[in-house]
């Protein structure tokens, strides 16, 4: 046993000599454990050992990519608005027609602002898209009836069965989704055979060919031309002419009569004033009509297109594809675009394309039928449905009808930028004042610290609001306003850091390396920035990180109260302003939950990173 002990000691001594003096023959396990790492590596090791730090990094990187990365691909139009799309809930399935409809054969499809309704050849009704105002809750009587006709209004739906019973459901703020009480008796003796929805109105054609209109503008405003229904049209011999189709926009009603003429009711705007006389006097037989917001279109029996109305909507003359002027089989329109199907099965479209409504799929050919309304398009080819246009809004819309995901992306960009610049300003001022006061001491220290106390004595948020209200009014551009907000936040939030730096410098300036630097005649500015400042770098980095979260929240708070970034420029704070409305909190949850989540994730992630940095830079952690 004694010899074994001696052998172990000798072997250990030999191994030590080999490790020290013979290259390549190292037993690395012991030396690696004892190897000294650089301070940076120690901090990095401690930081990444913290699981919450990893969570913070993932959260902040995700928010950063969401705000700055996606903003490169998602443009922001500050002045875009759409009353049709206001306050729509998150949904990206506007074009997802049920496969059962395709299997049973498509008889009809019509679209509202955020949904579509379909009728199969077997008489079944399907509704898809967003369930605003309960449009997808098909009434039981509709499900049990033999439906022969369906139609969609802006926010309501209609159906007619084989017994000429009419069914309406959905948005009803002007009674558009119920039979107007003025016409109940008329419809008992003259049943409805055709229904059409137009801009929160309902249009009905009866067996006798009379046209009835009710809903917005048709029941509530005295003197409005839409209030004059029913419309009954007579020929030269005072004989009634039946209406076969009627459509409406926000100001006009356009009617196609069975003799091939058209009539236009409503206000004296471009659609009514510039209507070609030959379309009304019977010299040309019209077989199809379409109506957008400010333009009207018609197709005659020879397949020739006629277009008139406003010249400002890019829908007339040179904007119409040459192939769409003749040989037309079908003509239909949405609110701001037109689609034409030619006799050779090709589809052409023009007009507004803000939601991709004229982006016809390249492979679409040999089309049998088209169904177009609102911002959705459907084409039937060999029994298959092809859809294009507005897919929906994945995070909903705001009160102006703007895509909410776009608002969140660019709002985050603004909030994160304002917070970052503000904290940088704060750190620069705080470090400069703290270093100067701590190094020179005496009167300089006394003067700077008393000034810091004066600044910190002001109530932060009320003072920031007051300065924002006063200074923002003098700014002429939104960029200037945001710069002023950055400066205000930075100038008001530096005293705490300056006192912290000063306290650290008071102890650092008495250390040997500072004394040696002074003895060597090194300039004071070099001693401060090259020798003393690195000793407090960890404090600066941690406060920079934690202060960023505070600045971000402060900007959001100021914008929420209306004293920060002003609309139409989005920031998470002014988007969250909607939460001041109880109706928004109760009904439009995405308008306050989503920006609130963005702010929470960003601030929490930054705080987690800051806390982890503080722990990683603590020398006591190196002992763990």
Image (tube, rainbow, N blue to C red):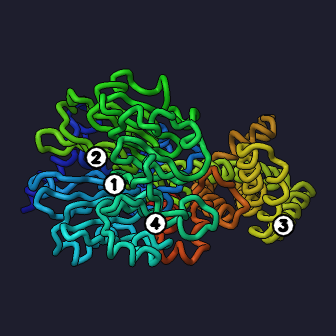
Q: Give the vertical position of 448 relative to 137 (above or below).
A: above
> Do the residues under discs 4 and 3 have CB atoms within 8 angstroms?
no
Mark closer to the chain start, 4 or 3: 3
Mark closer to the chain start, 4 or 1: 1
The secondary structure type at the circle numbered 4 is helix
In percent of width and height, residue 23 lies at 25, 30
Give the spatial CA distance, label 4 vs label 3.
42 Å
Mark closer to the chain start, 2 or 3: 2
Residue labelled with disc 3: 453
Nearer the observer: mark 4 or 1; the answer is 1
Q: Residue at x 49, y 42 (%)?
A: 71
Residue labelled with disc 4: 590
The secondary structure type at the circle numbered 1 is strand
Let me know if residue 546 appears in the view: no
Give the spatial CA distance, label 2 vs label 1.
8 Å
In percent of width and height, residue 143 lies at 19, 72
**Is residue 615 shown left or right of residue 430?**
left
Mark closer to the chain start, 2 or 4: 2
Give the spatial CA distance, label 3 vs label 1.
64 Å
> Do the residues under discs 3 and 1 have CB atoms within 8 angstroms?
no
Residue labelled with disc 2: 371
Q: Quadrant of the N terminus?
A: bottom left
> Do the residues under discs 2 and 1 have CB atoms within 8 angstroms?
yes
Q: Give the vertical position of 448 relative to 278 (above or below).
A: below
Let me know if residue 394 appears in the view: yes
């Amino acid at each position: 046993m004694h010899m074994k002990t001696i052998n172990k000691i000798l072997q250990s001594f030999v191994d030590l000599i080999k490790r020290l003096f013979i290259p390549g023959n190292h037993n690395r396990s012991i030396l690696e454990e004892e190897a000294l790492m650089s301070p940076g590596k120690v901090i990095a090791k401690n930081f990444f050992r913290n699981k919450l730090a990893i969570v913070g990094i993932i959260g902040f990187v995700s928010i950063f990519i969401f705000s700055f990365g996606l903003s490169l691909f998602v443009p922001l139009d500050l002045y875009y608005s759409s009353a049709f799309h206001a306050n729509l809930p998150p949904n990206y399935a506007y074009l997802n027609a049920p496969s059962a409809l395709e299997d049973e054969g498509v008889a009809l499809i019509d679209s509202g602002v955020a949904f579509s309704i379909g009728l199969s050849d077997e008489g079944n009704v399907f509704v898809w898209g967003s369930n605003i105002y309960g449009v997808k809750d098909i009434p039981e009587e509709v499900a049990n009836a033999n439906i022969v006709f369906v139609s969609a209004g802006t926010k309501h739906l209609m159906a007619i069965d084989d017994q000429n019973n009419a069914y309406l459901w959905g948005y009803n703020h002007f009674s558009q989704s119920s039979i107007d009480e003025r016409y109940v008796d008329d419809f008992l003796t003259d049943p409805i055979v055709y229904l059409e929805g137009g801009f929160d109105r309902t249009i009905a054609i009866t067996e006798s060919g009379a046209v009835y209109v009710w809903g917005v503008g048709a029941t509530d405003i005295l003197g409005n031309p839409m209030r004059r229904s029913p419309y009954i049209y007579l020929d030269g011999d005072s004989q009634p002419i039946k209406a076969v189709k009627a459509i409406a926009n926000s100001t006009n009603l356009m009617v196609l009569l069975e003799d091939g003429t058209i009539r236009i009711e409503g206000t004296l705007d471009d659609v009514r004033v510039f209507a070609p006389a030959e379309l009304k006097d019977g010299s040309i037989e019209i077989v199809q009509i379409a109506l957008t917001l400010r333009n009207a279109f018609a197709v005659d029996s020879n397949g020739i297109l006629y277009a008139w109305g406003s010249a400002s909507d890019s829908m007339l003359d040179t904007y119409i594809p040459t192939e769409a002027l003749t040989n037309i089989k079908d003509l239909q329109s949405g609110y701001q675009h037109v689609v034409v199907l030619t006799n050779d099965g090709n589809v052409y479209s023009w007009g507004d394309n803000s939601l991709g409504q004229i982006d016809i799929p390249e492979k679409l050919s040999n089309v049998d039928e088209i169904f177009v309304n609102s911002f959705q398009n459907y084409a039937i080819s060999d029994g298959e449905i092809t859809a294009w246009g507005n897919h929906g809004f994945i995070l909903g819309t705001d009160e102006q009808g703007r895509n909410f995901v776009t608002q969140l992306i660019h709002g985050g960009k603004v909030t994160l930028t304002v917070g970052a610049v503000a904290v940088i300003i704060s750190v620069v001022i705080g470090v400069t004042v703290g270093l100067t006061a701590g190094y020179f001491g005496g009167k300089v220290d006394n003067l700077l610290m008393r000034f810091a106390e004066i600044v910190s004595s002001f109530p932060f948020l009320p003072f920031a609001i007051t300065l924002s209200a006063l200074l923002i009014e003098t700014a002429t551009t939104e960029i200037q306003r945001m710069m002023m907000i950055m400066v205000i936040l930075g100038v008001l939030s530096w005293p705490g850091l300056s006192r912290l730096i000063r306290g650290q410098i008071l102890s650092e300036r008495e250390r040997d390396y500072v004394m040696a630097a002074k003895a060597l005649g090194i300039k004071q500015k070099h001693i401060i920035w090259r020798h003393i400042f690195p000793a407090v770098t960890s404090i600066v980095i941690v406060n920079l990180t934690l202060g960023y979260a505070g600045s971000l929240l402060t900007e959001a708070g100021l914008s929420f109260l209306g004293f920060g970034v002003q609309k139409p420029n989005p920031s998470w704070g002014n988007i969250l302003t909607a939460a001041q409305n109880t109706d928004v909190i109760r009904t439009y949850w995405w308008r306050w939950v989503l920006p609130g989540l963005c702010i929470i994730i960003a601030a929490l992630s930054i705080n987690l990173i800051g806390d982890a940095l503080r722990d990683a830079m603590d020398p006591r952690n190196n002992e763990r």
